[in-house]
């Protein structure tokens, strides 16, 4: 009897994505791939994380040890190859959503990631939006892009949920594991 793995992809290796991915990768039967864009500003994180090193500065209790453990176990790796979306049972979007000088959210990264996921995701995938976004973004920004790019319908061919992030520097693992979360789908 073979082992069954749940394949999870976490998009965006930042303050939310790294600890979320590492925590999932520490669960028996979960195999996690982090996706990080190969940019000048943050592309270095790919090699850093794949060597089992924590790129988050400051005191973050337990995170460095967790990353090292799951990389050694072989249940966590990071890539810039978006074709991994096609193998994922669940895809968590944790990309930054900055605001402009008028405090209007800039969703360029979220739109691009949604297009990429839509083009590659398999039928039955679960897509979870965890980025900090304004109310209605899941329905009015992410959902139409995923449906258009995939030719599939949310709620039937794939599942789409929103679960806002609950993190604070210095307490990343604590807040992710101890604070209740609200999920809307």
Image: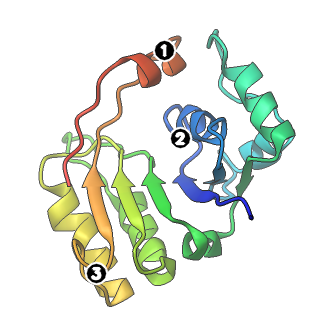
Across and down, in percent, residue 143 comes to 24, 70
Q: Residue at x 40, y 16 (%)?
A: 178
Identify residue for label 1: 174
Q: Quadrant of the N terminus?
A: bottom right
Rounded to the nearest whole Å, what is the CA distance between mark 1 and mark 3? 35 Å
Say few, some or many: other residues with alpha carbon within 10 Å of mark 2 (under 14 / 14 to 19 / 20 or more). Answer: many
Which is in the foreground here, disc 2 or disc 1?
1
Across and down, in percent, residue 120 comes to 51, 80
Q: Is residue 53 visible in this depiction of the protein?
A: no
Can you say whether 112 is above or below 147 in the image? above
Is residue 87 toward the left or the right of residue 76 in the image?
left
Q: Quadrant of the C terminus?
A: bottom left
Q: Which mark is residue 147?
A: 3
Identify residue for label 2: 17
* The one of 123 and 145 positioned closer to us in this rendering: 123
Report the number of numbered marks.
3
Q: Residue at x 60, y 60 (%)?
A: 7
């Amino acid at each position: 009897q073979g082992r069954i793995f749940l394949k999870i992809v976490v998009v965006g290796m930042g303050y939310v994505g790294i600890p979320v991915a590492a925590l999932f990768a520490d669960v028996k039967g979960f195999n996690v791939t982090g996706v990080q864009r190969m940019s000048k500003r943050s592309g270095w994180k790919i090699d850093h994380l794949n060597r089992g090193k924590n790129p988050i500065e400051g005191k973050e209790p337990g995170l460095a040890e967790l990353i090292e453990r799951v990389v050694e176990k072989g249940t966590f790796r990071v890539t810039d190859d978006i074709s991994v979306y096609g193998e994922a049972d669940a895809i968590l979007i944790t990309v930054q959503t900055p605001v402009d000088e008028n405090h209007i959210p800039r969703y360029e990264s979220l739109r691009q990631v949604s297009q990429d996921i839509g083009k590659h995701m398999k039928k039955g995938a679960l897509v979870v939006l965890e980025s900090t976004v304004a109310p209605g973004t899941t329905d009015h920004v992410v959902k139409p892009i995923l449906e258009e790019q995939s030719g599939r319908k949310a709620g039937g061919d794939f599942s789409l949920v929103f679960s806002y992030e609950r993190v604070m520097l210095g307490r990343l693992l604590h807040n992710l594991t101890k604070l209740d979360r609200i999920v809307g789908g």
